[in-house]
Amino acid sequence: MIYYCLEGCSKAIILRERVAMPVSCDAIIGVLHYWAVTAGAEQIEMDPRNTSRMCNQCGSIIPKALSIRVHRCSHCGFEAHRDVNVTKGIHARAGRARSHAS
């Protein structure tokens, strides 16, 4: 099963023919949901807090500035590019959210 995760937003802007147009996030999420379900995906809602600071190996919260691009966990020693760590952490959190929803 394919699933996707979205972080909540308060407003969005779509660029169309070089003109910025405000669009409701609900409209964007609705379109994404429609196409994802059409493709056989599942929508999962999850809490996005601390996804960039959480170690995906041990779950510790490691504070770091946005300019720090490598995640180094001082608790378990895990090291990875920040984006890789975040992606794995979101994937794991979405899996847990999915299993609790079942």
Image (cartoon, rainbow, N blue to C red):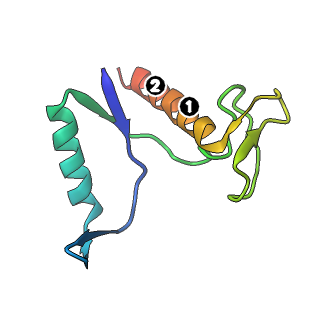
Residue toward you, 76 or 67: 67
Q: Residue at x 17, y 41 (%)?
A: 35
Q: Are marks 2 and 1 in contact (CB under 8 Å)?
A: no
Which is in the foreground here, disc 2 or disc 1? 1
Above-or-below relation of 18 to 39: below
* Secondary structure of the residue carrying numbered label 2: helix
Residue 40, position in %: x, y? 20, 26
Tally of numbered discs: 2
Q: Is residue 69 left or right of residue 34?
A: right
Residue 7, position in %: x, y? 43, 50
Residue 32, position in %: x, y? 23, 46
Above-or-below relation of 64 to 85: below
Residue 45, image quadrant = top left
**Outermost residue, right side:** 74
Q: Is residue 7 left or right of residue 68?
A: left
- How crowded pointer 2 is (Cα within 10 Å; few <14, some 14-19, many 20+) is rated as some
Residue toward you, 96 or 89: 89
Q: Which residue is mark 1?
A: 88
Picture disc at residue 95: 2
* Secondary structure of the residue carrying numbered label 1: helix
Q: Is residue 16 left or right of residue 55?
A: left
Residue 53, position in %: x, y? 68, 45
Q: Residue at x 76, y 29 (%)?
A: 78
Q: Amino acid at mark 2?
A: Gly
Which quadrant: the N terminus? top left
**Outermost residue, front side:** 17
Q: Amino acid at mark 1?
A: Lys
Q: Residue at x 51, y 47 (%)?
A: 48
Residue toward you, 21 or 63: 21
Gap between marks 2 and 1 measured at Cα: 11 Å
